[in-house]
Amino acid sequence: MDRAVSGATPADEHFDVLIVGAGISGIGAAYHLRDQCPDKSYVVLDALDGCGGTWRTHRYPGVRSDSDLYTFGYRFKPWIGPPIAAASAILDYLEEVIAENDLARHIRYGHRIVEAAWDTAAALWTVRARRNDGAEATFTCNFLWMGQGYYRHDQGYTPEWPGMAGFKGRIVHPQSWPDDLDYHGKRILLIGSGATAATLLPAIADDCAHVTLLQRSPTYFIPGRNANELADQLNALDVDPAWTHEIVRRKLLQDQAAFTLRAREEPDTVKAELLAGVSAFVGPELTERHFTPRYRPWRQRIAFVPDGDLFRSVMSGKASVADGEIETFTATGVRLKSGETLEADIIVTATGFDLSVLGDIPIMVDGRPVDLADSVTYRGMMFTGVPNLIWVFGYFRASWTLRVDLVSDFVCRLLKHMDDRGVRKVEVALRPEDQDMPRLPWVDPDDFNPGYLMRGMSRMPKAGDKPEWRHTQDYWAERTALPKIDLDGPEFVYGSKSLSDSGAITRTG
């Protein structure tokens, strides 16, 4: 029995695998580990009081997915519902995965990790966590599986504008939406132009005196019906939900691959098509004035706008759009560099995330602190100089969960391979032919450049100019390439013979 259930003191608990985070990545990791490596003991630690990660911490009105749930959902769990779903529906889905697969007894909520230290001599990670009651809990594990995401859940990014302290109303970031915020009948200034702003505006517009969307620069959107015609047809034919999920998933992935390729090869044509979709709701004049981005499609995420609700709110007169940069906050709003003033009772800063590298957890290897910016990434999931650790970092142009499934397959195959070889340590190292390889940013800013990545790029691991040493962000290539990785290739360095017969480690879980 897992000693978390029996109530034993956790200070001396050991597991084969420790998974960080009980959101979309951690729950997926736990499922695949249970399914593919049933002999492995494991525990999932999460700082929150429940599962879901993003879908629990984000509580602003209208919060929903910005990509379809047929590909955002796991491959093993059919999604039944509209393509774009509210946070509550996604939480229900995740809780069903936990319940259906008996994962709850392996999850420890209210455990914030404060340090992870690797000891080569013992081939073990020691993970210290602080519980919500203030007590510390210590775990050891052979393998550390980081699924905590890529941004700070406890705070969002808000720029420091002049005059903010003098504003007489409330300033709120959607990621920290207060339960007591009464926006009814108030003038709202919503700063931002991404998926969060596009979601929040139509959710509050009917209850506010007026909402003004202030954007420094527009972004691309895809408006359309919150329905999938193929899924509706298959459901009408009473096709098995698992079949429907897989068929629709494959069709969407095929369409997304074609769209991504066209965005690179025919950017002007794709741009015209995207703008035509917006123009169908607001007309060509407003499209040109407020909704025409300065960059080519897919350099940042493109959010789906279900039923064009953002644009309907603007056309109804309940919301309006302003463009420009803020010069200063005033007592009653903001003044733009153009001289225009915007009055507000509440200002909402939908200005993005604060990047988090491995959850901001201090990492030690043999007593030395690790700066991941000094490492080189192996396919965006392992790092030179850091043994027995995987980071799940998903896709920018496809659903995050697609990579959760692929990386999970890789980890489970790697763990079984280590058992077959009788070793307890694996790390990646540059091959002789890689020594003079240029050190590049985690992502190419000319290809993809959201603000949170640009602000935090210096803290991210470096990439190389070969597919093995970068996160290609190409699901359609990785779904073939990752299963074919040669685990005995020269980039994998193994060590530490197994102690399975020594009795030196007591397993739990």
Image (tube, rainbow, N blue to C red):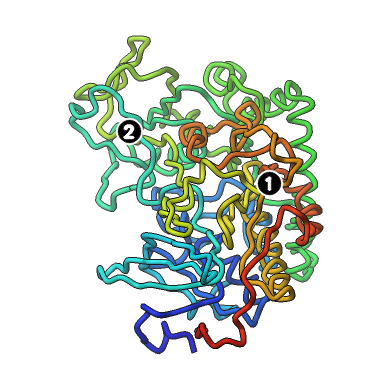
Q: Residues within 10 Å of mark 2 (few under 14, many from 20)?
A: many
The answer to whether 481 appears left or right of 448 in the picture is right
Q: Are marks 1 and 2 in contact (CB under 8 Å)?
A: no
- Which residue position is annotated with label 2? 188
Q: Nearer the viewer, residue 338 or 466?
A: 466
Q: Is residue 110 above or below residue 301?
A: below
Q: Amino acid at mark 2?
A: Ile
Residue 194, given in percent of the width and then of the height, sits at 50, 35
Q: Is residue 232 above or below residue 457?
A: below
The answer to whether 135 appears left or right of 240 in the picture is left
- Which residue position is annotated with label 1? 430
The answer to whether 360 appears left or right of 386 in the picture is left
Residue 152, given in percent of the width and then of the height, sits at 41, 48
Residue placed at 56% from the left, 28% from the top? 219
Q: Nearer the viewer, residue 282 or 155?
A: 155
The answer to whether 137 appears left or right of 263 in the picture is left
Residue placed at 56% from the left, 75% from the top? 16
Residue 461, given in percent of the width and then of the height, sits at 56, 42
Q: Earlier in the sequence, mark 1 or mark 2?
A: 2
Residue 110, given in percent of the width and then of the height, sits at 36, 68
Q: Amino acid at mark 1?
A: Leu
| Pair 1/2: label in front | 1
Q: Residue 484 — which label?
A: none
Residue placed at 21% from the left, 28% from the top? 167
Q: Residues within 10 Å of mark 1 (few under 14, many from 20)?
A: some
Q: Nearer the viewer, residue 438 or 71?
A: 438
Q: Is residue 233 visible from the viewing direction of this image?
A: no
